[in-house]
Image: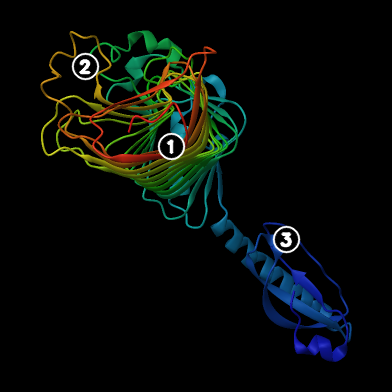
Amino acid sequence: MRYGSESAKHNRTPRCLCACSSCAHLMLSSSYDYKMARHTCSACDAHRVMSLFLHRRSDMAFPLVALFFMISARWCLEVAHAGRQVFDVMDFGAIADGETDDSKAFIRAWMKACASPGRPAVVVPKGEYRLQPVVFRGPCKGYMQVRLAGDLRAPDDLAAFRGSHEWINFASIDGLLVTGGGTFDGRGASSWHLNQCPTNPNCKPLPVSIKLGRVRNVTITGVTSLDSKFFHVIIIGSQNVSIHRVTIRAPRDSPNTDGVHIQGSSNVRITDTAIATGDDCISVGPGSADITVSGVNCGPGHGISVGSLGRHPGEEDVRGLRVSNCTLAGTANGVRIKTWRGGLRPGSVVSGLVFEDIVMRKVRNPIIIDQEYCPYSSSSCRHESAQRPSVVKISDVKFKNIRGVSATQVAVKLSCSGASPCHGLELRDIDLTYVKRGVATESRCENVAGGMAGGMLVPPSCI
């Protein structure tokens, strides 16, 4: 704390009265005169509060000290309350017994917090809360916080989702932090057997667990998403979103339980996160730009994928993706770009991708570009005829320092489109050995029009 020239003049250590309700911090002495000043009180969480500097002179200052304390305490209470309001869902009628529908209590708490300035927080204490599909909608006056210590449970019955495509929907919010160590339990096991999407191209998708739609400046950290019915987290039409130290879990055989799907969004960061699912750990869809994936542990699952792309007309480009310092274990693919056969011209563009510093542990297809993607049976894919190759254009893609063990002999497969060959591919410092000792791994290229390779190359480059 900086002291004024008067304290130096008297050569005495000044004393401070800091009346702040948020920390109840008070230092008081009765035989000091005073002067007014402003300072930043670290004990009061950096709130700007009024302080009283007192210097020993006479006992006459005490009544003034007492008066100042009463006034400043009330003033600080109002400031702190406005800046750090807390809205506990229990105060709005939540029961937290795992059986009662607590949806209305959550909505009431959210609406009250959303109408408050500063950094209002919706607090969810430990307990089990059953929620119907809910929309936490903005815009809000302040920077919203959700402090989730409890476990949220989705409905088992799909009838509860009539008219809703997601369970928890954060919509049109600028400024949101979700934290607290709690769990979003999608209760997917009750519905996975009803999912027809793995075999039916015209299926109706099951509900997503968490949707971030048209949001900005959002951080989700320190929470768990468990057993989603469909995708765990979808980020769509959003900017500046961070998923950090999140745990996402679903069984290996759970269908379409992608960990995080990004679409039509920019400046998205997924860091230090553990994902184990029955589908892609991370999927990057059309219209995505400036995506960072770092420190992700993926497996089981289908790997980290760009796509699928090219199935629908008018899809936007994917530009700017960096995947680094990740580990994939036991996944069906490693790092993958997948585009559908067919499609209408002009096709979208995939460019500016970097996959580097990645460890593969018994991964099938560690490095793969698949421009003949069709996950259905051969009969279902006949409409995606080989006479209509993919029109998605892939260029400027780098695979660097990728090492480990491949569960397939073909460790590098670059199968590009005959209609739009790949350009600007780079393989550098690749070291992928086959799980069967004594058998060498291979690389295969198709319709790769240009690229380069260097450094250690196991298997040898086909570029």
Residue on which the image places disc 2: 201
Marked residue nearer the N-terminal end (2 or 1): 1
Residue lying at 81% horizontally and 67% vertically, measured from the top left: 27
Marked residue nearer the N-terminal end (1 or 3): 3
* Crowding at mark 1 (Cα within 10 Å: few <14, some 14-19, many 20+): some
Q: Quadrant of the C terminus?
A: top left
Left or right for 453, reference 363: left
Q: Position of residue 258 (x, y in %)?
A: 40, 25
Identify whether 145 is placed above or below 166. below
Marked residue nearer the N-terminal end (3 or 2): 3
Query: Which of pointers 1 and 3 indicates the residue nearer the eye?
Result: 3
Identify whether 434 is placed above or below 10. above
Query: Which of pointers 3 and 2 indicates the residue nearer the eye?
Result: 2
Residue 93 visible in the snapshot: no
SS of the residue at dot 3?
helix
Residue 461 occupies quadrant: top left
Residue 35 visible in the snapshot: yes
> 3 and 456: which one is in front?
456
Q: Amino acid at mark 3?
A: Ala
- Label 2, label 1: how far apart the Cα atoms are: 36 Å
Q: Position of residue 195 (x, y in %)?
A: 32, 13
SS of the residue at dot 2?
loop
Tell me the number on the disc at residue 107: 1
Residue on which the image places disc 3: 43
SS of the residue at dot 1?
helix
